[in-house]
Image (cartoon, rainbow, N blue to C red):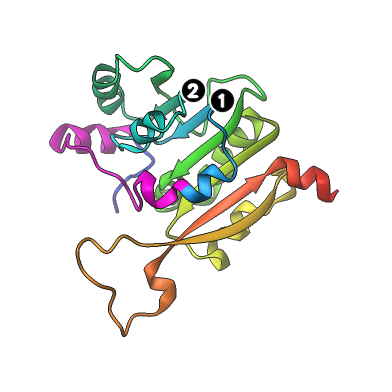
Amino acid sequence: MAQYGKSEYWDERYTRDPEPFDWYQRWAGLKDIICEHVKPNHLILNTGSGNSRLSEEMFEDGFTNITNIDISSVVVNSMKEKYADKQGMSYECQDVRQLGAGDGTFDVVLDKGTLDSLMCGEGSTHNTQKALLEITRVLNSNGVFICVSHGQPSYRLTYLQKADYGWSVKTQTVQKPMMGTTASSTSEEKDNLHYVYICSKASREEGA
């Protein structure tokens, strides 16, 4: 089993394959959903950023306060150099299970595949809970956590819908990119979707 929660795995992977890669979706596929909840002046934390173009494309669309973190120093150093000219977009080597930011620092935390990768490794339940507790800690009282996942609600909501996190959860879906092909007519609809979990502290307070 690949050790997705270990920095050594990702350092080796990014050394071997440094080309930009986006898990699940590019910005174009997520833009409509994210823009419902994120404003250009928001302070954004992008977890497990890797060498995705998501932050670059968001930056070009006016979201210019993005802190990107990744557990791999190899990819962080590479991205720091690549985007050195983009003031307001930073890269830091951090573990989502132990974030360096203070309480209530961010308006938005984005996750595209990071929790999924933790769930595939050793100690998945413990590591996922540590990550979610850190995410809710660094979000402010009106903050929102947007998690893009391949996991269906029957699996993911058991992790996300805990009272400890102080948020309410809504689920939206986006079609998987077809990579130049058409979806199989025999495949089930749920197999052609990615799930976007909107975990909002503000709506939790409104519903309290």
Q: Residue 80 has which mark? A: none
The residue that appears at 47% across and 42% down in the rendered structure is 111
- Specify the farthest residue to the front: 61
Q: Nearer the viewer, residue 194 or 153?
A: 194
- Specify the farthest residue to the bottom: 186
Image quarter in which the N terminus is found: bottom left
- Reply above or below: 12 against 158: above
The residue that appears at 62% across and 52% down in the rendered structure is 160
What amino acid is found at the position of numbered circle 1 in the picture? Answer: Asn
Magenta stretch: dominant secondary structure = helix
Q: Nearer the viewer, residue 208 or 130?
A: 208
* Residue contact between numbered discs 2 and 1, judged by CB atoms under 8 Å: yes
What amino acid is found at the position of numbered circle 2 in the picture? Answer: Asn
Q: Name the residue tied to disc 2.
A: 65
Q: In the rendered view, does 195 fall on the left or right side of 202?
A: left
Query: Element under label 1?
Result: loop
Q: Nearer the viewer, residue 35 or 177?
A: 35
Q: In the rendered view, does 154 fall on the left or right side of 180?
A: right
- Disc 2 or 1, which lies upstream in sequence? 1
Q: Name the residue tied to disc 1.
A: 41
Q: Position of residue 101 (x, y in %)?
A: 56, 20
**Splitting the image into 4 quarters, where does residue 102 fall?**
top right
Q: Which mark is in front, 2 or 1? A: 1
Residue 123 appears in the figure: no
Q: Which region shows up in magenta?
A: 7-31
Q: In the rendered view, does 148 fall on the left or right side of 132?
A: left
The residue that appears at 32% across and 45% down in the rendered structure is 3
Q: Residues within 10 Å of mark 2 (few under 14, many from 20)?
A: many
